[in-house]
Image: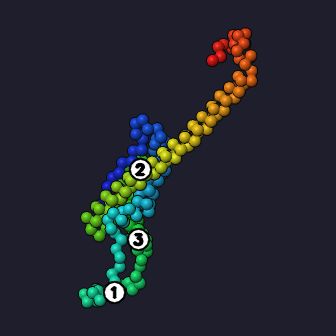
């Protein structure tokens, strides 16, 4: 068994976008979401690829028979089926404990301490990358919403200015009349 502590501090100084308002209870939604992200296929698929944990089954070739290698499985699995099996095995051997809302402990139970260390290190690295991708996606979507709103407001300003200009063109005597201007102050 190997484990690593991960500190999830989502609030950085001057970054109100990433701030998550939480109360400190045992059923902290934020920490549980982080646990699910760590155990998700998006993270663990990358771990499988990074550490090359998807092994193809040995063939029943002449070399295998010569060296007396016998496969316990007679059915050969394709790469996708092997990946599903490896992913399932990895999910069963990865555990995430919530110490408090910001500290998580990722642990891996493997056949050897070296493999457990490599797996837990890869899980932590891929979790950080995946979480950063999620945050970047949210920020990009937020920027898109703000840009649409800004474009809408600029369109409304243009319409108001155009309406004012049309009014001035249709009523030059009212706009330029000094008596009316003194009532409302200077009109540019």
Determine the residue positioned at 41% across, 57% down.
38
Q: Secondary structure at mark 1?
A: loop
Residue beneath disc 2: 132
Residue beneath disc 1: 60
Whichever of callouts 3 and 1 sits on the residue coming sooner in the sequence is: 1
Whichever of callouts 2 and 3 sits on the residue coming sooner in the sequence is: 3
Determine the residue positioned at 41% across, 54% down.
130
Q: Which of 69/11 is in front?
A: 69
Q: CA distance from mark 2 to mark 1?
A: 44 Å
Viewport quadrant of the N terminus: bottom left
Residue beneath disc 3: 83
Q: Which of 74/96 is in front?
A: 74
Q: Is residue 85 visible?
A: no
Q: Where residue 51 sits: x, y (%)?
A: 32, 65
Whichever of callouts 2 and 1 sits on the residue coming sooner in the sequence is: 1
Name above or below for residue 155 compared with residue 111: above
Q: Where residue 29 sits: x, y (%)?
A: 49, 50
Q: Which of 136/107 is in front?
A: 136
Q: CA distance from mark 2 to mark 3?
A: 25 Å
Q: Secondary structure at mark 2?
A: helix
Mark 3 surroundings: few (<14), some (14-19) or many (≥20) residues within 10 A = some
> Do residues under tags 2 and 3 come within 8 Å of each other at their CB atoms?
no
Name above or below for residue 162 compared with residue 28: above
> Do residues under tags 3 and 1 come within 8 Å of each other at their CB atoms?
no
Q: Secondary structure at mark 3?
A: helix
């Amino acid at each position: 068994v190997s484990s690593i502590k991960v500190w999830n501090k989502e609030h950085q100084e001057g970054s109100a976008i990433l701030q998550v308002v939480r109360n400190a209870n045992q059923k902290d939604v934020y920490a549980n979401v982080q646990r699910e992200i760590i155990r998700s296929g998006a993270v663990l698929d990358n771990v499988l690829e990074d550490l090359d944990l998807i092994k193809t089954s040995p063939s029943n070739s002449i070399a295998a028979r010569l060296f007396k290698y016998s496969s316990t499985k007679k059915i050969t699995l394709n790469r996708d089926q092997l990946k599903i099996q490896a992913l399932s095995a990895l999910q069963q051997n990865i555990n995430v404990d919530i110490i408090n809302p910001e500290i998580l402990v990722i642990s891996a139970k493997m056949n050897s301490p070296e493999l457990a260390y490599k797996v837990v290190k890869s899980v932590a690295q891929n979790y950080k990358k995946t979480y950063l991708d999620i945050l970047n996606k949210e920020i990009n979507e937020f920027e898109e919403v703000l840009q649409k709103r800004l474009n809408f407001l600029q369109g409304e300003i243009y319409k108001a200015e155009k309406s004012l200009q049309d009014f001035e063109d249709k009523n030059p005597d009212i706009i330029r009349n000094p008596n009316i201007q003194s009532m409302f102050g200077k009109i540019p």
